[in-house]
């Protein structure tokens, strides 16, 4: 089993629960998509805060286990522009996971090729020219290279 948001927290010993992000912060300020930040100080991180069920508070310390750090990555446009290096737990990430899941559910590829999008273009996968395959590839690229897709010059370079 996996979490569509890509994010889970430890809810008890040897147990975890899926969750989603409830906000991304940089320098203690809530930032909105596309999650701009300043990469000039590598010690300053983006903080992806996530939801924890009230029933799990006894096990999970709210102060230390309700967030994930992500580096602020240079946007390759100038020296001061950057974006959070991960969007895990967000709706954007969830959409990418759903697209990939659709491709994998229809795959007859060998286990070693299952997660290779190039193999999915072959007969064992969902095939060439399939819009669902193209969408899954685009979404996977965008999640993987999030900091670089917000400028047309860096997007086409990557």
Image (spheres, grey):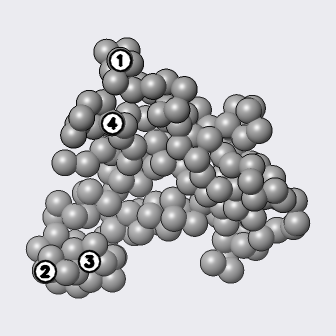
Q: Secondary structure at mark 2?
A: loop
* Residue 57 placement, left or right of 23: left
- Camera-nearest residue between 26 and 131: 26
- Label 3 to label 1: alpha-carbon separation: 45 Å
Residue 157: image x %, image y %?
68, 80
Residue at 22%, 74% (x, y): give it.
114
Q: Nearer the viewer, mark 4 or mark 2?
A: 4
* Residue 24 placement, left or right of 65: right
Q: Give the mark nearest the N terminus, 1 or 4.
A: 4
Residue 136: image x %, image y %?
38, 63
- Label 4 to label 3: alpha-carbon separation: 34 Å
Residue at 70%, 56% (x, y): give it.
72
Crowdedness near tag 3: few (<14), some (14–19) or many (≥20) residues, C-alpha within 10 Å? many
Residue at 33%, 45% (x, y): give it.
4
- Judged from this view, the residue extending furthest toward the top is 54
Q: Nearer the viewer, mark 1 or mark 2?
A: 1
Reply above or below: 29 against 84: above
Q: Is residue 17 visible?
A: no
Q: Nearer the viewer, mark 4 or mark 3?
A: 4
Reply above or below: 93 against 122: above
- Label 4 to label 2: alpha-carbon separation: 33 Å
Crowdedness near tag 4: few (<14), some (14–19) or many (≥20) residues, C-alpha within 10 Å? some
Q: Is residue 9 visible?
A: yes
Q: Nearer the viewer, mark 1 or mark 4?
A: 1
Q: Which residue matches tag 2? A: 110
Which disc, if any, is residue 10?
4
Residue at 47%, 34% (x, y): give it.
65
Q: Which residue matches tag 1? A: 58
Q: Secondary structure at mark 1?
A: loop
């Amino acid at each position: 089993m996996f979490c569509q948001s890509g994010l889970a927290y430890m809810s008890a010993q040897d147990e975890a629960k899926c969750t989603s992000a409830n906000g991304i912060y940089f320098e203690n300020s809530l930032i909105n998509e596309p999650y701009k930040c300043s990469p000039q100080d590598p010690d300053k991180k983006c903080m992806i805060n996530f939801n924890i069920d009230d029933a799990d508070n006894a096990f999970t310390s709210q102060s230390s286990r309700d967030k994930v750090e992500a580096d602020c990555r240079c946007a390759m446009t100038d020296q001061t522009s950057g974006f959070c290096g991960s969007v895990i737990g967000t709706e954007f990430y969830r959409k990418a996971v759903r697209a990939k899941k659709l491709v994998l559910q229809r795959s007859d590829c060998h286990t070693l090729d299952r997660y290779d999008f190039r193999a999915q273009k072959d007969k064992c996968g969902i095939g060439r020219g399939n819009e669902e395959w193209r969408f899954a590839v685009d979404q996977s690229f965008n999640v993987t290279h999030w900091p670089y897709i917000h400028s047309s010059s860096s997007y086409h370079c990557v």
